[in-house]
Image (tube, helix red, strand yellow):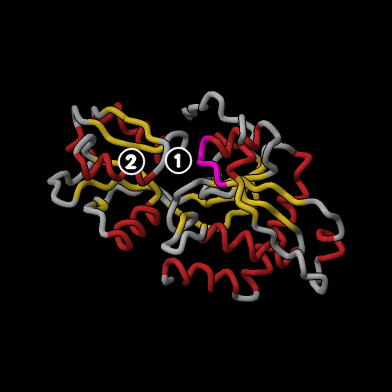
Amino acid sequence: MKKRLISGLLTGIMALSLVACGGASESESASESAAGSSDKVWKIATDTSFKPFEYTDDNGDFVGIDMDILAAVAEDQGFKYEVQVLGWDASIVACQAGQADGMIAGASITDERKESGWIFSDGYYDANQSMAVEASSDIKGFEDLSGKSVAVKTGTMSAAYAESLAGDYGFTVTYFEDSPTMYQAVVGGQVVACFDDTPIMASNIKDTGIAMKIVDGTGNDPAAYGFAIFNSDNQELVDMFNAGLKNIKSNGKYDEIIAKYLGE
């Protein structure tokens, strides 16, 4: 999978942090003795805009499914954390460089990523990828893309999906750093379509009214999103995430979070 590393990324990376300590006062938590007995603050990197999983709301607060799941898991397990809002590529680099302990950013669990050093939690949400076009476009499927350019977000499952189709259907792939910029390229006519995670596009179209539509029949098979680390020394963090995820699914908190953002 293609990955683009941004030069100079590591300089001042901590200045982009957003502090969000979970479970700091939950001394009564059943898991406190295991996870909250130390003063360790786990550094968790995330994307800047991947609505509804992470984004800035109208009040200027950084919110989303990933943020709420992380908070609920931390409360359940009694650990403290700090969110670093860095962007997709920057989050990967920060984790690989040891400047972040883990990453939650709608990252699909794949064998390719595992082979390249990602260590994933259990899946916390199943999503697939599909194609969207400008609302008035007459493109009805991949066969209409010949000789045209489509947009993807660098290093994502949707990018890999588009790349796997490009040769068969004769289109070229243009890379962007974030979903909102990519969507604007579609609306502005710089590209004829984009590939992204289906719930992300559906949420943006619904909530922002952006002039786009998802093309029926273009989705691939779903894959699970996972919390990720890049250093086996942080396995404790994955173990706590898995335990907390299991608990919030059992007590109904997980369903509340999903319903809050997706109405499911």
| Number of numbered callouts drawn | 2
In the picture provided, is 101 more to the left or to the right than 224?
right
Q: Which mark is residue 157?
A: 1
Q: Which is nearer the eye, 20 or 263?
A: 20
Q: Is residue 116 above or below residue 102?
A: above
Q: Nearer the viewer, mark 1 or mark 2?
A: 2
Residue 85's x, y, as percent?
A: 55, 46
Image quadrant where one finds the C terminus: bottom left
In the picture provided, is 75 more to the left or to the right than 125?
right
Residue type of the residue flagged with mark 1: Met
Say which residue appears at 82% left-offset and 65% top-offset.
Answer: 32
Residue 70 in sight here: yes
Q: Which residues are magenta?
A: 85-89
**C-alpha distance separating marks 1 and 2:** 15 Å
Question: Helix, strand, or loop for circle 2?
Answer: helix
Q: Which residue is mark 2?
A: 182
